[in-house]
Amino acid sequence: MTELPAQPVVHEVNTRVWLREVQRSTGRPAGLGDVPKDAWDEITPHGVDAVWLMGVWERSPQGRGIALWDQSLRTAFSQAVPGIQENEIAGSPYCIRRYEVDATLGGAEGLAAARAELDGRGIGLLLDYVPNHVAPDSPWVSGHPEYFVRGTPDDARRDPAAYLDTGTAVLARGRDPFFPPWPDVVQLNAFEPALRRATAEVLTRIGETCDGVRCDMAMLLMNDIFARTWGQRAGTPPPDEFWPTVIDGVRQRHPGMTFVAEAYWDLEWALQQQGFDFCYDKRLYDRILNEGAESVRRHLTADVAYQRKLVRFLENHDEPRAAQTLHPAKERAAAVLIATLPGATLWHEGQFTGRRTRLPVFLDRRPDEPVDTELRAFHERLLAGVHRSGMRTGQWRLLECAGWPDNDSGRNVLTWCWAGPAGRFLTAVNLSGQPAQGRVRLPWPELGSGPWRLAGLLDGEQYTRTGDELTGPGLFVGLDAWGTHLLAVDPGRD
């Protein structure tokens, strides 16, 4: 098992789409065991610590059939990829029949080869786990009906969209409490002890093949959420929570396995307490996209230990592409922001090159889009610069950018620093569409009065300032709209 750093940088890759493009570029069949080294190099740029191969498990033929008959889905598929063909619709990677690597991707041998390729680069491997539901043709449906939330024949007659009559049992279709049932999955019962044991067993087997899992919609399995969603149909809530029971069982075999929760509804802290190493920071994403610097600053006042266990992102397969939702200059500013905060960082394949199409996860093919070479070069500099600096091995601290009576534009500048064995570093991000100025007082009295060099990690710019200025009135910062500074603070020369 590759040991991930305390705050890893993760690159999400849509496995089927990526392999299809590798095959097109090489002209040869491409399972996970056939990928050439330059293709692995492309998805593991300097600064990436782990690759999340999204969608490797065996998808449900029955679930695919449901998707093919769903006209609203077919319309969405055609809008995303005009001319999409039926044989390019694989079905949902979150409608899983079995936790076996899909044979079309190279099976277990192909995944083992992929893991070896990543391990040789010192890069970890993350895979999916879907705890809330399985496909209607999962072996569990016929073999273990006790694992599921049950209904009655009357339920199935009255509401066939919410219940599935298998002929031997009536099972609830999967759902969360705020949306109608999903037609292609059936609902597991988080309160059932046998299901908890089976979940731990599956995750233990998965742990033999990777370094961690991203758990889909993890908050749905929490006792209070599950009880509110299913009421008496789920039975009496057990005294113990689902996740501590499951994760503790897995870690008896895989103590270093990383657990990442897709989490919403402000339940990140609770899921961290239940054993997750990292939880999605959807609040930060929403604030960056829709609110201003002050809202982001308030979010960053949370306890640092809590923040170190969050996953920062600007897009993933569930969100629109950053290049589509953000002004290009704001996209770069936001990238500097998330790359230099505490916690894990999640990047989405295609984000670096400016892809704009949000691809439905059911599809094997995405449209061709031009590569934004400048954006790719920017991201390469950013990831490599942050990684080489070692800043995130130090201690992080939120700072203030102070204005003056006739100019309070500094309120739009977000600033923080890192300090540790790798050195001292300062980030300043103008999260607004107007120029901003202010002063940032650095919290390092040990700088003394002598000269210090401030070197830009992305642009190579260098400035010399005295310790008296940096720790007294503070460093003057003047930034254009969406401008940034990412600076190493090193002793200057007399």
Image (tube, rainbow, N blue to C red):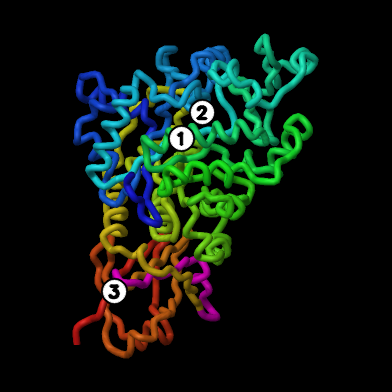
Q: For the view shown, which residue lies furthest in the bottom direction?
A: 449
Q: Is residue 179 visible?
A: yes
Q: Which residue is mark 2?
A: 94
At which x and y percent is residue 7? 40, 56
Q: Mark 2 touching mark 1, by CB under 8 A? A: yes
Which quarter of the picture shows residue 120? top left
Closer to the observer: label 2 or label 3?
2
Q: CA distance from mark 2 to mark 1?
A: 9 Å
Q: CA distance from mark 3 to mark 1?
A: 42 Å
Residue 493 painted magenta: no
Crowding around mark 3 (Cα neighbors within 10 Å: few <14, some 14 to 19, many 20+) is many
Q: Is residue 8 above or below residue 435?
A: above
Left or right of residue 71, residue 53 in this image: left
Q: Which residue is mark 3?
A: 454
**Of marks 2 and 1, which one's residue comes earlier in the chain?**
2
At which x and y percent is residue 440? 43, 76
Which quarter of the picture shows residue 5? bottom left
Q: Which residue is mark 1?
A: 128
**Amino acid type at image mark 1:** Asp
Q: For the view shown, which residue lies furthest in the front direction?
A: 252
At which x and y percent is residue 492? 23, 81
At which x and y percent is residue 28? 21, 19
The stretch of residues the image draws in magenta is 404-423
Say what secondary structure mark 3 lies in.
strand
Q: Is residue 412 above or below residue 350?
A: below
Looking at the picture, tell me which residue is in the foreground, 125 or 197: 197
Say what secondary structure mark 2 lies in.
loop
**Of marks 2 and 3, which one's residue comes earlier in the chain?**
2
